[in-house]
Amino acid sequence: MEPSKVGNMLTHQYVINDPLHQVFNAVNAISVQGYDEQRRVIYWNKGSELLYGYTKEDAIGQKIEKLIIPKSMCDLVISAHSDWIEKGIEIPAAEITLCKKNGHDISVFSSHVMFTNQYNNKQMYCIDIDLTDARKAQAQVTLKEKMLETIFEAIPDLFFLMEPNGTICDYHTSNTSDLYVSPTQFIGRNMSDVLPDDVANKFKTHISKALAQEKMTSFDYELAMPSGLLYFEARISHLKKPNQVMVIIRDITEQHKSDQIIRHQAYFDSLTLLPNRFLSLDRLSQILVEAERNDEKAAVLFLDLDDFKKVNDSLGHEVGDKILVKSAHRLQQVLRKEDTVGRLGGDEFIILLRGLTDHQDALAVAENLLNLFRQPFKIDRRELILTLSIGVAIYPKDGCCASDLLRSADTAMYQAKALGRNTYSFFTPEMNIVMQRRFEIEEQMRGALERNEFELHYQPQMDVKSASIIGAEALLRWHNPVLGNITPDEFIPIAEHTGLIVAMGEYVIEQALSFLNLWQKSDLNNYTMAVNLSPRQFRDNELIPFIKKVLSDTGTRPTTLELEITEGVLMSGQSYIHDALISINALGIKLSMDDFGTGYSSLSYLRQYPFDVLKIDRSFINGITINKADCDLVKAAIAMSHSLGLTVIAEGVETKEQLQLLERLGCDIVQGYYFSKPIPAVQLLEFSTQIHR
Ligand code: C2E
Ligand code: MG
Ligand code: MG
């Protein structure tokens, strides 16, 4: 018989539970199957069709073990079923894996009931619920749990679950030693009973904040742990269901440290550890606000180490750095606690004095500072004396804001340098005019060489005895279309400062020597040419090679070139200057000490270096006929020079009387307006032919 027919018959015969079947037929989500005592299907609802893939027609009359029971379970099912029928041993509800028509496994939760029908036959009903989704969900939950566990393990953060009132319900940590106290001391307790008051208060505030808003809130706090003071970041978010707060704690001690370092670097100079320019100016602004409020004065002192560049160049940056560090310490010594010393950069420092009643207070500080630098610096068993130039600006008189005051103090510092360094200078409004002019000159000087704005004039040098011309001094002239004629006394120091003197000096050497060559050839005379050299030119490694090259290019005899230097060049005592002078001498070039009498007029220099010529400054020549002291000095200088084998040139001879007196004193050569002003090359050629005629 076809199973379906058997099914129909059986169905008809066994169906007793019509109302029950109606219910089962209505629920597609649950599979309900009915079996007779031989385990043949007598009922198969829509839910069973959907779950197992067998239609009602497929199933009715089939034995359970032929349909959905996996082979391995068949014997078990058959015996369990017969135990139930015969011995009344119930088959308990259980999660089992059955088999679908397409051969796939299916997890179900299977419950069973046994009915006895009117013919006293037993009928088993199986009610199976698909566990696929539940299993999936379960697997998801397990996976999530596993994931969380791994996360908690892997990340060093601490997690706390708290009640909104701060009671700690749960925690997670990968390392219990990260906890402030042991779990037994905080689980179930309120965090305010565990944490220090200030930290607990922060938590309280932020928990309230997290409860009030949707977003996560975070804050930093510090906690004294057995290992030291640590910094933490707490993030708090509100979990609506259940009404709890999740607290995530991260140790940010390292980050905090590096933040502090970065902050320090942004505000402090790494070498001297003094406030840097930024912080100094910020402090100045604060001081000014305070000064205005209290109707007080404040002072800005702009400090610059004299000749620091030379120290750096000759002794190396390491020594330079040590000097800067030691200078910083010295500066701090002079100050009151409330004053500030900062480093603006390079060898520039700033001192801010607050709460002054009188500008004399600043003067006293400036004097103290100068005194402080009278002591030599002891560096690597070497003693170095470095002086300071200080510019002082007073609030509110010299500027109302930090930048104005700094500029005024800088201007005053320039003035202190111009006054000969190792001194201080208070700002005056006139200085601004000087500075303005300086800037204009600096600006115009750039490109002036290329624009051919420079020219050399030559001042004849006359032999006193024969009254004949023996040579000339080359003197630079500058005509600028904007500023007009600018004197060398004004532009040379600026060119020195900017370094433009190096290129200008090369121009002078080239021009002077090519003219000398032409001049010497014009009347076959062994004229000399004196060229001035500035200190800055000695720092140029190319100076000596350049001179050599020009000498050979122009075919000039080195003995007819005379290089004039002032005492200032020698005073720094740098070894490269010494070396350069020796090389100059070795080349056969003459060396001349210019402006003698204006500086220290130290005789030791004349002995120490290979000088050939001494030029007495015109300020002494000017007074020789009227001032006995000047006359005595000139007399002594001449005698001394001669004893050292030097030729003496008197500068600035303007009168016949001066010339006659100099002749009597035994001066060798004179130079001055009496014979001629510095004149262009063409005029000099004329002048020398006239004299010789
Ligand atoms: P210096 O080397 O002492 O030059 C002598 C200065 O005295 C020149 O001024 C000259 O014009 C001036 N003079 C000469 N005779 C008389 C006189 O009888 N009476 C008066 N009142 N003055 C006289 P100048 O040309 O203005 O140069 C000034 C200074 O500028 C020079 O002093 C020198 O130190 C510097 N200088 C000029 N040209 C150069 C240059 O090419 N290179 C460098 N490095 N410095 C230069
Ligand atoms: Mg000179
Ligand atoms: Mg001179």
Image (spheres, rainbow, N blue to C red):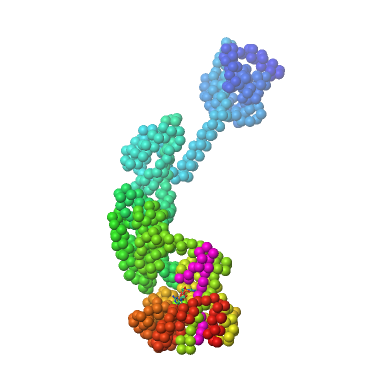
Q: Position of residue 201 (x, y in %)?
A: 34, 39
Say which quarter of the image contains residue 357.
bottom left
> As rendered, which of 555 and 253 lies closer to the eye?
555
**Residue span colored magenta:** 468-489
Left or right of 470? Residue 170 is left
Q: Position of residue 469 (x, y in %)?
A: 51, 84
Q: Is residue 308 above or below residue 241?
A: below
Give the residue drawn at x 62%, y 28%: 99
Outermost residue to the right? 1
Give the residue drawn at x 50%, y 75%: 475
In which quadrant is the N terminus drawn? top right
In which quadrant is the C terminus drawn? bottom right
Q: Position of residue 514 (x, y in %)?
A: 58, 78
Give the residue drawn at x 41%, y 32%: 212
> As rendered, which of 477 and 119 lies closer to the eye?
477
> Which SS does the magenta portion mostly show?
strand
Q: Is residue 392 above or below residue 503?
A: above
Say which quarter of the image contains residue 604.
bottom left
Outermost residue to the top? 118
Q: Position of residue 461 (x, y in %)?
A: 49, 82
Is residue 82 one of those drawn in magenta? no
Q: Is residue 397 above or below residue 456?
A: above
Q: Is residue 37 at least partly visible in the picture?
A: no
Is residue 471 one of those drawn in magenta? yes
Q: Is residue 295 at least partly visible in the picture?
A: yes
Give the residue drawn at x 44%, y 36%: 237
